[in-house]
Amino acid sequence: MIKIPQPAIAVNSLNAPGQAYSMWSRYDVGESFDPSYIMNRILSMIATAPEGRIRALVLNCHGFTNIRGEYGYGIELGTGIDILNVGCFKILSGKIDLIVITACGTSRISASSTSGGDGDGHYFTSTIARLTRAKVVACTEMQVHDPSGIPPYHIDEFEGLVTVYNENGQLVNQIRHPSTYYLENLVESGMHYN
């Protein structure tokens, strides 16, 4: 488990697998919520935090894939956030220290990607960091949720390669975790994946 610095907001998609994360504050997002509405709601929640800012924002949802099942196409939060509407994050600029995205393959560069465009998860994640002026942590591989439960103020461990971007959108670190979970094993073990 990874402990998240507080105050933090957990934004959980209602269709995310596993349990919803709980932080200082929590927002559960339905599939019909558009990105601007979601960001404005997060901004209102931040306004109630001490000093009008938060230490972390956790985005708990599925990652978008293309028809070949390749990751790097955005996140399935509400109606979805991809390279075409990632600008919605700008409203949160200077209000957050860290954004943690638990969705599968968010920072993956798919084999079918266009550099700086659709399928370039590196560019997508880097853009979120630049727009929000926050450090962003995301992964390149499929993620799983432990069905035994996660206590408040924590998230699951990451699987595979995790990328870290600074507030200027520069890739500053990559951390390799075991890539031990494969789809066939998930079904047998009862684990849920993003």
Image (spheres, rainbow, N blue to C red):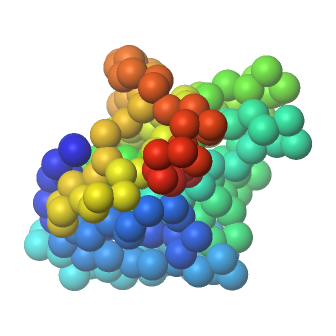
Residue at the image position 21 percent from the left and 55 percent from the top = 154
* Count of marks placed on residues: 0
Left/right of residue 191 with respect to residue 156 in the rendered view: right
User: Could you tell me residue 80's position as x and y percent?
Assistant: 68, 63
User: Could you tell me residue 24's position as x and y percent?
Assistant: 19, 72
User: Could you tell me residue 55's position as x and y percent?
Assistant: 20, 55
User: Residue at the front extreme?
Assistant: 188
Residue at the image position 22 percent from the left and 44 percent from the top = 2
Q: Is residue 72 visible?
A: yes
User: Could you tell me residue 109's position as x and y percent?
Assistant: 67, 25
Above/below status of 61 relative to 183: below
Instruction: Name the one closer to the observer, 184 or 101.
Output: 184
Q: Can residue 134 be seen in this view?
A: no
Above/below status of 112 relative to 21: above
Above/below status of 74 relative to 48: above
Residue at the image position 73 percent from the left and 26 percent from the top = 110
Q: Residue 41 appears in which quarter of the rendering?
A: bottom left
Q: Residue 15 appears in which quarter of the rendering?
A: bottom right
User: Residue at the right extreme?
Assistant: 67
Left/right of residue 114 with respect to residue 133 in the rendered view: right
Residue at the image position 27 percent from the left and 61 percent from the top = 149
Above/below status of 105 relative to 154: above
Left/right of residue 39 with respect to residue 164 in the rendered view: right
The quadrant of the image that shows the N terminus is: top left
Instruction: Name the one closer to the observer, 114 or 69.
Output: 69
